[in-house]
Amino acid sequence: MPKRQKKTVLNNRLPYSVRVLLESCVRNCDNFQVLEKDVQNVLQWETNQTVEGGVEIAFKPARVILQDLTGVPAVVDFAAMRDAVRDLGGDPQKINPICPADLVIDHSVQVDFARAPDALNKNQELEFVRNKERFQFLKWGAQAFDNMLIVPPGSGIVHQCSQSRLPVPQVGRAFLRQHADSAARVRVVNQDCQFLKWGAQAFDNMLIVPPGSGIVHQVNLEYLARVVFSSGLLHPDSVVGTDSHTTMINGLGVVGWGVGGIEAEAVMLGQAISMLIPKVVGYKLVGELNPLVTSTDLVLTITKHLRSLGVVGKFVEFYGPGVTALSIADRATVANMCPEFGATVAHFPVDERSLQYLSQTNRSQEKINIIEAYLRATKQFRNYNDPAEDPIFSEVVELDLSTVVTSVSGPKRPQDRVSVSVMKKDFQECLTNKVGFKGYGLSPANLSASGSFSYSDGKTYSITHGSVIIAAITSCTNTSNPSVMLGAAAIAACTNTSNPSVMLGAGLLAKKAVENGLSVLPYIKTSLSPGSGVVTYYLRESGVVPYLEKLGFDIVGYGCMTCIGNSGPIDDNIANTIEKNELVCCGVLSGNRNFEGRIHPNTRANYLASPLLVIAYALAGTVDIDFETQPLGNRADGSPVYLREIWPTRAEIQEVENKHVIPGMFKEVYEKIELGSPSWQQLSVPQGKLYGWDVNSTYIKKPPFFDGMTRELSPRAGVTGARCLLLLGDSVTTDHISPAGSIARNSPAARFLADKGLTPREFNSYGSRRGNDAIMSRGTFANIRIVNKMAPTAGPKTTHHPSGDVMDIFDAADSKENVPLIAVVGKDYGSGSSRDWAAKGPFLLGIKAVIAESFERIHRSNLVGMGIIPLQFLPGESADTLGLDGSEVYDIELPGEVAPGELVTVKVSNGKSFQVKARFDTEVDLTYFKNGGILNYMIRKML
């Protein structure tokens, strides 16, 4: 058989997700970033996917998607690059994303107001008060940069829901009076809106979706996804995003996954990312779902199954006749939970259902015809009923859909699925089980604990173990804020509000509940934040909104709210009662993460569930209930109402969905999406292609990455006279390195903010201040659990040499002016989620090199991207075997023309010397290093 024909046959047996990798390698092969070897390695996937240690390839995604918390640092870097190009005599307008980038502002809105008709208006206005500077900057960027899309807030149906909006100052003052703790943040965080809005106008090729438009993943699914790029050479859509749940787009047949900020910026600048050829698990679906189960029940079943199998770092690709019974929304629900079961992607190749979805969401028929023709011609279109099209997989597992039952997951992990039929028993067992993922260690005497509190309606209520306090139908990827989700029943939407079947099902359940005289207790904080304006549209058109509102599920905003912890305050009397009586109150949410402490400090048990079950548990007021034998409540005549009596069937839901989810509503919502709300439109931003930095801002600051940069390359030598800043052991993760969480009051970052006149209430979190390097550098290595062998105790301390003083890591680094620093670490350095500040932070501390026993692959690449030298001990050697204690002075002799993987010598002031391997693994790595980092390289390339 001719060689070319052999390759074609092999390509036809490749998993469909791998075919996307192959096409990208072929199309982008330049023998610099993407080598012919990469193409061959993907073609030989069946062999290479089993190679121990993996086979590395270069991959260039078709686009990038960002959310605002992770997108702000990227836009800050691009704005600073423009200044650098100008300073070097170039044209700053050349700095734009080369790869299309979309930024959706969805992580800023919070449920401060709920259970009221004006809750949406108040929350959205308060969002602008808090985030003004960030939003202004992004709005500027959307206009100033090419190839950058920023979609404004309040688009589409948001305008219809916000007819009588309160002025920003009025809401701000009311909030200041009523919520002192959060109000302090308002005065500081309002800087952010301006920055985001500036970015929206300053950059081409970048779309910034304004706040109020919906969640990033649903907007991606309904509007941004191309499936096939049709401008110029036809090629498959693929995407990397700075949110772990970017994987949701795989439900539409687009390969996509989450990456760190540096990788995202690299792709935006036209660079390839490094990855290992993945193993691909074939997940075969057969049978059909029971009429009473939902896609949430399916995804919880799959999550538990795949988590038990172990699929971390692998692709999962679904196939089999059962797939045809799943809508795109069902598939997206499964794909969204990919991070929870650990895979890189959970892929559903494009089929006829995918094309129907594109038509339903108002994609043009011409575009759909191109997509179908291209995918069929390139063997990337799937017929799930034809086993002859089944590819080769690394391994195969099977699920009979008919075995899926109504379920929840919890109380502390998404993979711990519990059938609703045994939920009551499981919860009661968890109360007395020893402390762990399924236990709270309560003594028998504590099982009957309860407490009473007075509520604002003048009545007294009692709660006990299992009581539900918040019910939020919210559009978000996860449940992360420990400050607001006390006892939450949260319908969290990135997983679910993209799915008409479960959202309409929740609405129909609410309708039947109201018609049968049921209600939700007034102290339960109920709210509804749809994933996009389209959801609100079809909920209103189907007539279920009044019933949801009757149960307290008023619309409160569009964005990631409850799931990421933006659930707002709860009544102090409730919190005090829980704490005083040590109650295990529960959260029930339709999101995808329920780790302990993630929802709220007082929410000790949290269960993931479908939106229908969230309403059911909200009606019951407790999770300590058996729905089969115990009623939700009683009718006016005293007769009991059981859940089975009001639960809608899939046929009922499908009838409503077919009638009301139509292309016209997608057209109406998304044709306005870039306009944004009146608040966004009225937000003034700096004009021009260069940003006017505010030196007094504590949120947006010009980073010093390019200070002193020259047009011509300066020789990069080794490191002379370096001091060791940290001596770390094995498995130091990016969570240990990167700033995260609240800013401790005794930290260097806190002292910096206090010097700026801010009070502790105004400090906010590191995440909200990612656009200010002065804060982030002070938070690097600030994890309270980091173990530095140069400090007497665990925590963000080190010993300054030669003084011998123990001090904060930042202060020690800051005190060594003009003295280069290194870190000496153990195995698997930089493991965990990829975080851009895990490389940016060490760079700003002055760390020039990291000597490790081994590196996590992506983090090593990120270090190179920041110009830091990654060096690896030779096998059998380590800081311990070489007797290093961190007090020494180090000289690293790096040759002028170092080669990938070359051995270099490290000389130590104690008279010892040893060799290490320079972990520049490719010529691309060396190019970045010689330029001082990837961003510096791109600046010089644009001159």
Image (tube, rainbow, N blue to C red):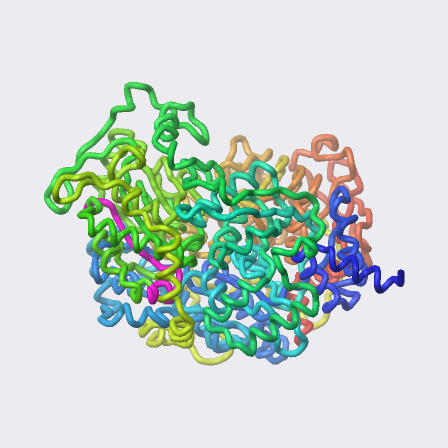
- Residue 930 or 925: which is nearer the viewer? 925
Task: Give the percent coordinates (x, y) of residue 745.
Answer: 38, 44
- Residue 316 or 759: which is nearer the viewer? 316
Quadrant including the N terminus: bottom right
Residue at 80 percent across and 50 percent down: it is 901
Instruction: Identify whether 594 is placed above or below 883.
Output: below
For the record, the magenta segment spans 522-538
Task: Give the percent coordinates (x, y) of residue 768.
Answer: 42, 56
In this rendering, would 1 be left or right of 491?
right
Q: Is residue 533 magenta?
A: yes
Residue at 43 percent across and 58 percent down: it is 498
Residue at 72 percent across and 35 percent down: it is 878
Residue 26 falls in which quadrant of the image? bottom right
Instruction: Identify whether 909 is placed above or below 927.
Output: above
- Residue 397 or 903: which is nearer the viewer? 397
Task: Give the percent coordinates (x, y) of residue 530.
Answer: 36, 59
Whether residue 743 is visible here, answered yes or no, is no
Task: Give the percent coordinates (x, y) of residue 376.
Answer: 66, 68
Residue 174 falls in which quadrant of the image? bottom left
Identify the residue at the far right of this view: 1
Identify the residue at the far left of this view: 458
Q: Is residue 97 magenta?
A: no
- Looking at the rendered structure, the number of numbered marks drawn on it comes to 0
In this rendering, would 704 be left or right of 34?
left
Whether residue 271 is visible here, answered yes or no, is yes
